[in-house]
Amino acid sequence: GAGVSQSPRYKVAKRGQDVALRCDPISGHVSLFWYQQALGQGPEFLTYFQNEAQLDKSGLPSDRFFAERPEGSVSTLKIQRTQQEDSAVYLCASSYGLAGGPYEQYFGPGTRLTVT
Amino acid sequence: KNEVEQSPQNLTAQEGEFITINCSYSVGISALHWLQQHPGGGIVSLFMLSSGKKKHGRLIATINIQEKHSSLHITASHPRDSAVYICAISGYLTPKAAGNKLTFGGGTRVLVKP
């Protein structure tokens, strides 16, 4: 595809529901990142994949957050038992290179999650 | 203390004015990124730089590695430049595999009035 795509663009979940957010990176990009952006703040790192391997998940805020990239392309970020503090924009980014870059990152449009 | 600090947080300018946004960081890096985010929109990479200066159209980015400081300049500002500008760093000098992950500043909200 032409760029990084994410779906859904908007998601409203009732507290306690599980949600799944999808990211389609640019074809051929090895590295994939998930970031969380709270309203009015800069994004914060959640987790990183190099191909299908999740090499860093130090930013995941709790064990309710789980990410996977089973075939090294599409990635899914799952949040179980959503809480109000999970409301944020979830951004996915991909880059061509392996760890140790630096490489420019290409961002998707984000998924805005609202937990009511 | 945040590893990446931006100033100002908000900036209002008249069309045509010269704008400067500053970014300071406190750790070793291999690159600094300037990004643009329009309301409701995704993030677009403007510059990635490791030293010196880069220019693209009316945008200029500079970095001083010794002083751990970078600036983004917008010359002849236009209302379409209104957006949030975010500074981010990558390439921590650590053995972690995710050395390319970005650490972001809080952003500078720029409003250019006609």
Image: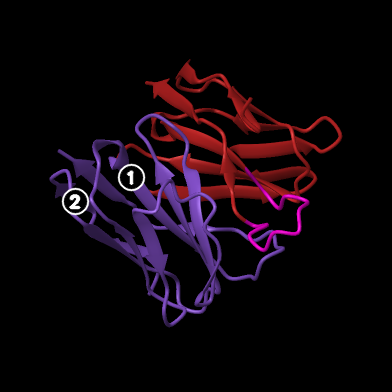
**A60 is within the stretch colored magenta:** no
Residue B108 position (above or below residue A84): above
Q: Which chain carries label 2?
A: A
Q: From the image, state the color of chain B.
A: red
Decide which of A111, B65 is in the foreground and name it: A111
Amino acid type of the residue that numbered disc 2 sits on in the rendered structure = Lys
Sequence-wise, which precedes: disc 2 or disc 1? Answer: 2
Q: Is residue B51 visible?
A: yes
Q: The purple chain is which one?
A: A
Q: Which of A47 and A24 is in front in this view?
A: A47
| Res. A89 mark | 1
In percent of width and height, residue A76 lies at 34, 67
Q: What amino acid type should be assigned to the residue bearing mark 1?
A: Val
Residue A24 horizontal/vertical position (percent): 37, 70
Q: Where is residue A93 in the image (x, y as percent from the top left)?
A: 47, 59
| B25 or B7, nearer to the observer | B25
Is A45 above or below relative to B85? Answer: below
User: Going 45% across and 51% down the picture, which residue do you hit?
Assistant: A60
Callout 1: 10 Å neighbours few (<14), some, many (20+)? many
State the quadrant of the N terminus of chain B. Answer: top right
Task: Name the residue located 54 percent from the left edge and 20 percent from the top edge.
Answer: B17
Residue at the image position 43 percent from the left and 77 percent from the top: A73
At numbered mark 2, what does the secondary structure look like: helix, strand or loop? strand
The residue at which mark 2 appears reads as: A11
